[in-house]
Image: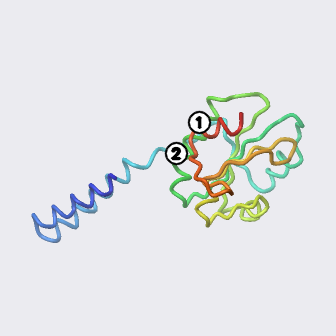
Amino acid sequence: RSFLHAKVLSLVFAFMSGDQIALIATFAVYGIMLVLLVPPKGASDNVIEITDETFKQTIKEAYDPEMSHIVFFANPFNAENHYFESTFAALSTKYVHTKLQYSTVDLTKYVELAKEHDIDPKQKKDTPCVILFFRGKEVSRLSRKEKDGKEDVLSEEAVVKKFE
């Protein structure tokens, strides 16, 4: 909705002034809107980034058989992933447990890991995706769109409800 306001504002500038001023004003407005609309990256000390090798070591061949893992499979080129990243970081600080580990996987770097878990980073419905693992096996999954076709909003409440 804010981008619509920016477009209208740029059209107003175009009619009120010369083309060069309108172009500069348009870029300035779009730049400001991008800065204001993109939430800060949700880094957290409780979330670890894992690779295909560390995934195998910590989740598949679990060193602690009682440890559960919530893994956020993210495509950094998908805007929805950026918004969910801060939610995931907040979850990791709010729902802390000694037998629960929060992790992220960059799907652009670890394509084989994505394929192994039936996630296509190019499909908007597949990412972001959060999977709960216990004893190396997938227990539950929450993605932007469930397999039955119903939209599923990735919010803190949706994740808590799905994995409680």
Q: Do the residues labelled 2 and 1 touch (CB within 8 Å)?
A: no
Dot 1: few (<14), some (14–19), or many (≥20) neighbours within 10 Å? few
Q: How many marks?
A: 2
Q: Nearer the viewer, mark 2 or mark 1?
A: 1
Q: Quadrant of residue 42?
A: top right
Residue 152 position, x and y percent, is 59, 49
Residue 59 position, x and y percent, is 83, 46
Residue 18 position, x and y percent, is 11, 69
Residue that numbered label 2 is attached to: 41
Horizontally, residue 38 falls left or right of residue 163, namely left
Q: Quadrant of the C terminus?
A: top right
Marks 2/1: CA distance? Answer: 20 Å
Horizontally, residue 112 falls left or right of residue 150, namely right
Q: What element carries label 2?
A: loop
Dot 2: few (<14), some (14–19), or many (≥20) neighbours within 10 Å? few
Question: Looking at the image, which is closer to me, 164 or 93?
Answer: 164
The residue at 63%/58% (across/down) is: 149
Q: Given the current orientation, which residue lies at the most extreme bottom position?
A: 19
The residue at 57%/57% (across/down) is: 76
Callout 1 amino acid: Glu
Q: Quadrant of residue 88?
A: top right
Q: Which mark is residue 10?
A: none
The residue at 76%/34% (across/down) is: 100
Q: Earlier in the sequence, mark 2 or mark 1?
A: 2
The residue at 58%/41% (across/down) is: 43
Q: Which colour scheme is used?
A: rainbow
Q: Given the current orientation, which residue lies at the most extreme left position?
A: 16
Q: What element carries label 1?
A: helix
Residue that numbered label 1 is attached to: 157
Callout 2 amino acid: Lys
